[in-house]
Image (cartoon, rainbow, N blue to C red):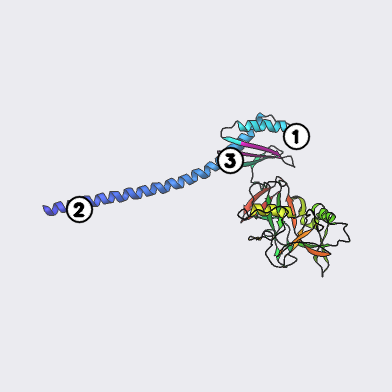
Amino acid sequence: MDHLKNKKGISLVALSVTIIVIMILLGIGIMISHNLLMDKVIAASNGTIESYLKEQIELALTSTQLTNWLEKSKHLNQILKEELEKVENVTNVEIEQLENKDLAITLSYQNRKYYFKVLDNRTVRLYNPLKGNVKIGDYINYPIEYTDVYSKKSYTSTNGWRVIDDGFMEGTTGYVKIISTGVPGKWYYNPTIYENNKMAINRIINDFENITLIDDVNGGIEKQGKEFKVEEIASKITTLTLGDLNQVYNNFYSHKPKRALNDTSDFEDEYELFKFDVFGYFYWLATEKENSKYGIYYMSCIGMQHIESKFEIGIRPVVYLKKGLEGELEDHVWKIKK
């Protein structure tokens, strides 16, 4: 009898343990399934939100009766803005008329920003604007390839251009601006040709596309500044000023002491945005300093130096990207969509 009792007791314990193990496994399975389901719900939700907002914009366009909406007067845009702000959880609506007559609409929904473009045929689509998304230092896929005049290194469209202005820097033009990673050309400065430094400064800031750049003095190869400008992407092309450089530095290296806009002292460029600390590199800065007869400076490995006489030196183009361009981040490089 005792033997039978022990046998029965052991069976009950085993059964209890088995049930507990099954419950634990069942619980883990439910948790995993729940997490997978939530991931799918979140992904679907994002798509649903974008579709929902797109639909709301289409309804708002219809409700404002924009039959001749291509004119896009401020009044009509204001009505459209008010209509969108009536949508629940929609805030911070901004509407911008682009150069090609499209509308760019930025809005927040549940504290997340969304960007839409309304094309001239009233098609509404989600887009990822370069402005506000790119960061200083990011690489841009800009379709100009070149060879560095100093290092002879070849730069491609994916590593040859970097962002120096995200379009939101205080005190700047509001354009996204990129600069060549390397030094793609040289310009010969002769004070006997130019009456003063101001004229030379004016040329490299405002007349860059008509300047003849020299790639190789010995070979006599010449390149026009306009060859660095891609018309459908670039709005303007210049070179870097001292004020620009210090302003970008202050934003890019926020962990370092701020520099005055006319500061010509040495600084550490740890991410080589300006290629300052690489020996042998120097390039033009279109700069004028107050109370100085030397108005033009250049960047070198020992800081900024002023130009005193005839000088041939590298030049790095700064490209203003046209407003309203779209972009996608692919393999850590921004690809521009026209």
- What type of secondary structure mainly makes up the magenta span? strand
- Check if mark 2's residue and mark 1's residue have beta carbons within 8 Å: no
Residue under the point 66% across and 31% down: 62
Quarter-of-image position of residue 239: bottom right
Residue 61 seen in render: no
Q: How many residues crowd around disc 3 within 10 Å: few (fewer than 14), some, or many (20 or more)?
A: some
Of residue 319 and residue 51, the one placed in the foreground of this image is 319
Residue where numbered disc 3 is placed: 50
Q: How many residues crowd around disc 2 within 10 Å: few (fewer than 14), some, or many (20 or more)?
A: few
Separation (CA) of disc 3 from disc 2: 60 Å
Q: Specify whether 22 is left or right of 114.
A: left
Q: Which mark is residue 186?
A: none
Residue under the point 81% across and 51% down: 206
The span picked out in magenta is 92-113
Amino acid marked by disc 1: Glu
Residue 103 is inside the magenta segment: yes
Residue where numbered disc 2 is placed: 10
Separation (CA) of disc 2 from disc 1: 87 Å
- 294 over 235 or under it: above or below: below
Amino acid marked by disc 3: Glu
Amino acid marked by disc 2: Ile
Q: Which mark is residue 71?
A: 1
Quarter-of-image position of residue 90: top right
- Check if mark 1's residue and mark 3's residue have beta carbons within 8 Å: no
Of residue 55 and residue 259, the one placed in the foreground of this image is 259
- Sequence order check, earlier mark of 2 and 1: 2
Residue 267 is inside the magenta segment: no
- Sequence order check, earlier mark of 1 and 3: 3
Q: Secondary structure at mark 1?
A: helix
Q: Position of residue 161 (x, y in %)?
A: 70, 57
Q: Position of residue 149 (x, y in %)?
A: 75, 66
Of residue 330 and residue 308, the one placed in the foreground of this image is 308
